[in-house]
Amino acid sequence: MTQRVELATVMDRFAVDGLVTEYAVAVDDGDWEAYRGLFAPDGRADYRSAGGIEGDADQVAGWLAQSMQLFPMRQHLIVNRRVRFGVLEQDTGDTARVQADYINPMRFAGHDGGSTAPDFVCGGRYAFGLVRTDDGWRLRHVAVQEKWRRTPQTHHEPAAT
């Protein structure tokens, strides 16, 4: 590999990493216009394993906008990113795949009490498929594989004697 190719690969890794971060920030901030802008024109997302839908970026952004109203506080962290570049139309580095783990603490709307601790937490793995476009790297596919979730436990008072 030449230094020029190595530098281009490093720059692409930064750009891909930045796009994945922008994805998390858009979802956490509820910026659905920014969310839509992260996708290539044929981009799709699949949230079915987490109880959601599969569809194009516009459909999924609408579903997220509605369902995330339940969770006004959310902060999802995407970690352990594994990036692999691929080939499209004979050019190296035109596609990328990212596999990354996530943890997503959220707070239900209308939660009473002074605690700021999350009362719903889930985790799993993302599979991102990216493509280089004239506008830079964009998401072609996002698949969520939820592996676990912790929901509020009902606290039972001891039986009166």
Image (cartoon, rainbow, N blue to C red):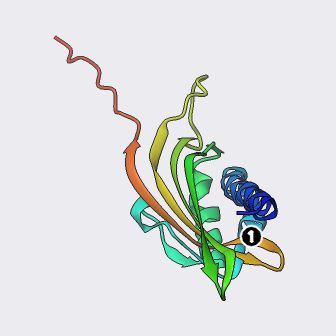
Residue 145 seen from this side: yes
- Residue 156 sits in quarter: top left
Residue picked out by circle 1: 137
For the residue carrying disc 1, how many other residues have a C-alpha within 10 Å: few (<14), some (14-19), or many (20+)?
A: many
Decide if residue 53 is on the left or right side of residue 148.
right
Q: Is residue 107 in sight in this rendering?
A: no
* Amino acid type of the residue tagged 1 in the rendering: Trp
Residue under the point 61% across and 22% down? 114
Q: Which residue occupies the foreground of this view, 23 or 107?
A: 23
Say which of 81 and 123 sits in front.
81
User: Total marks drawn?
Assistant: 1
Q: Is residue 110 above or below residue 56?
A: above
| Residue 30 placement, left or right of 97 | right
Q: Position of 77 compared to 99: left or right? A: right
As helix, strand or loop, the secondary structure at mark 1 comes to strand
**Residue 68, position in %: x, y?**
60, 56
State which quarter of the image contains the C terminus: top left
Q: Is residue 80 above or below residue 125?
A: above
Quarter of the figure with residue 19: bottom right
Q: Residue at x 73, y 51 (%)?
A: 29
Looking at the picture, how far across and down is residue 6, in whole percent?
Answer: 74, 59
Q: Please name the residue shown 83% across and 80% down the image.
A: 134
